[in-house]
Image (spheres, coloured by chain):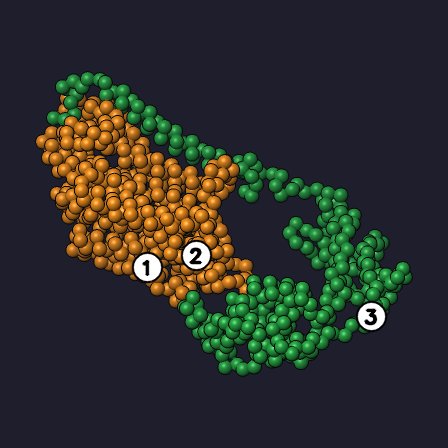
Chain colours: A green, B orange
Amino acid sequence: MKNYILLIIGFVISTGVYAQGEWIVPADKKGKLSTVTFSSSMEKLGADIFKNNCVSCHGTPGQNNPIPLMPSPGDPAGSKFSDNTDGELYYKIQEGRVTMPSFKSALSATDTWNVIAYIRSFHKGYKQEVAAKVETNIPEGATLAMDLSYDADAKKVFVKVIANNEGEQIPVAGVDVKIVAKRYFGQLPIGEPKATDGNGIANIDWNDELPGDSIGNVALTASFVDTENYGDLTVAKDLKIAVATNKPALNAERAMWNTVKKAPLWILFSYLGGVITVWFFIIYVALSLKKIFALGKDEVSDEEQVIY
Amino acid sequence: MSGEKFRLNKTKLDKIATDVLRPVGFTRGFHNWMAFLTVALVACLYAYYIQFDKGLIVTGMRDMVSWGMYIANFVFFVATALVGMLISGVCGLLGYKWIKPVSRIAEMIAVSFAAVAGLVIVSDMGRPERLLNVFLYGRVQSPILWDVTVVTTYLVISSLLYLLPLIPDLAIARGRDNKMPKWQSMVYELLSFKWTHHPKQYKLLFKSIRILTVLVIPTAFAIHTVTSWLMAVTPRAGWDSTVFGPYFLTGAFVTGMAALVIAVFVIRNSYRLREYLNDDVFDKMGKLLQLVCVVYFYFNLNEFLVPAYKMKGADAIHIHELFVGKHAVMFWFTQLAGLILPIFLLLWKKMRSPINLMVISLFVLVAAWFKRYIIVIPTMEHPFLPVQNLPHEWVVYQPTVIETAVTVGSILMAVMIFSVLAKLFPVIPIWEMAEEHVEDKENETH
């Protein structure tokens, strides 16, 4: 433990950032605000994330027990933290610096805001400012719906976004959407994200030579790019728009990764051959022992005596 | 052996039997020694009970370093056990006569270490009660199954190689010593297989031993090559090596020879068998130790210098950790004290005297244990996938007290098995020492 800390200190000094002072956040990131008001449920979620990701260095907020690094990670309840704007905290958590790791790939935007909500719960006199609503043609209180379809002639996948306002259907314009296709492991992004047009439709190029399942189906999922403002709405559909591929399943044939019943024959024979050969001789020796035992009843003539 | 007749010289046999059988029997000193080992073992078993109860969380192993001291210790045990093959198999088939007085001690080491090696693996299991599943659902594609198979087979062959040459000795002992406790003479009777020194019995015995000495070589090669493959079949830096099999095997010769020298030294002094385990035997053992050290050094050179010359991404991090990083002290200790210094020191005949050779072997053996640690742990600390935000204890492996106690327990167990064998049965093959080959002129004239 001690050595490890020394190692980090050595690393920090050698990279020359020890002398580096304040952590400057770009001006355009400073003013970033959460689109929702921090609630106690957000704080609770944030506390969980904090426990798993932050406690090891920052300690428990309010107890001033961060680990002794240089520069100190600081207690999130202290002024070192409360002096930051929400945007600054957001930037620092996402980007990281030196010993503070970047959480960009570990924590989603929502997770990050939950952590900030949790940290803010320790700051007395903090007043939250909520981001102004983004200008769109979505009426207040409308519910959003999304649909996926395919145009075979144009070879395009259409994503249609509709706002439902008390029975009235309004196409949502100017919102970025993206689609992904399901594959063996994870998802394959299809093309670049596109904005919806005046009809609420975004069209994304589709390559119909992509392999689908045995009947040419491909499972597509559409979602918003800016989930922070528009929410986690998705639509998933199986569309018969790809080339039917009838490859055997990865576990259909004999393979190294398969079960023992479907092991490659060469490995089966090598293993069993080796084991049987060796044990054949072991059993042969055991039978010789039996013979030795049986010979014990025989008389040894003087002529045959080994000891003389 | 045509034209040659196998004979035992009675006067010679009598003298050797008297000397070798004198220390046999559970003396007061032996009782005290075993009592001490038992008390220590009970403490270690309690540590294992805690681990069994709470799970592997009580060890230093975590998600990243999931192979720790136990696996390193396992490799060490397998390596030590291989001395049986080196002496009985390789040297035996080459016809070296000097191995006769130490061959049984080598087999005793092989049996006791191979027997405990299996248990060491069980100590690394979080759910040992599922051990049977390895046999029920094991996949022949997995080196784990190969390992279980060869360790078991090697234990059986080593036990037979220990038992077979013992049979005539037990018959000799039965015919002489009447002071033996009843249970001991029953064991002797059972294991002497009604031996009457019948020439046909000898013929069968020679044939069986011959088969086993040939069989033990590929089996021992398999056991340690497979142990190395447990690591080498992965693409990880430090393990992804084509010389890993021979690298492990030659390393095992070094470990085994060091263990043998120490065992022979202890027996020579406490049993007063200096006449048989004499300076000449030590001189030969010292030369053999040096030879295997040189061969092992050659593999080390390949194993470290080739990647160090290229310094490929992940390899570079690994090599750096070993040469100048966190593991540097341990690494250079194993290389210098356990390999390079012995190679030079053993050039002098004086250094191959019993006491000097024993001290050198102690260093070699301790270094050999740490070498296994160096092979297993540093690689695990550097996964290929980028990781961040991991708790410190996942990244840096630190064996816990419980883990260390369980490991010490395994060594105690091996020492106990060895001690019991060393006191229950003669440690030097009596009949083989009294063996004489006389020209069978009668046969030739016919």
Which residue is disc 2 drawn over? B60
Mark 3 crowdedness (10 Å alpha carbons): few <14, some 14-19, many ≥20 = few
Measured in 3D between alpha carbons, the distance from the residue under mark 2 to the one under mark 3, in whole angstroms, is: 55 Å
Q: Earlier in the sequence, mark 2 or mark 1?
A: 2
For this orientation, the residue located farthest to the right is: A168
Numbered circle sitting on residue B335: 1
User: What residue is rendered at 68% in x and 42% in y?
Assistant: A247
Which residue is disc 3 drawn over? A136
The three-letter amino acid code for the residue at tag 3 is: Thr
Is label 2 in contact with label 1 (beta carbons under 8 Å)?
Answer: no
Is label 2 in contact with label 3 (beta carbons under 8 Å)?
Answer: no
Q: Position of residue A149 (x, y in %)?
A: 82, 54
Q: Position of residue A134 (x, y in %)?
A: 78, 72
The three-letter amino acid code for the residue at tag 2 is: Gly
The quarter holding residue A190 reads bottom right
Q: Nearer the viewer, residue B187 or A200?
A: B187
| Position of A41 relative to B100 (above/below) | below
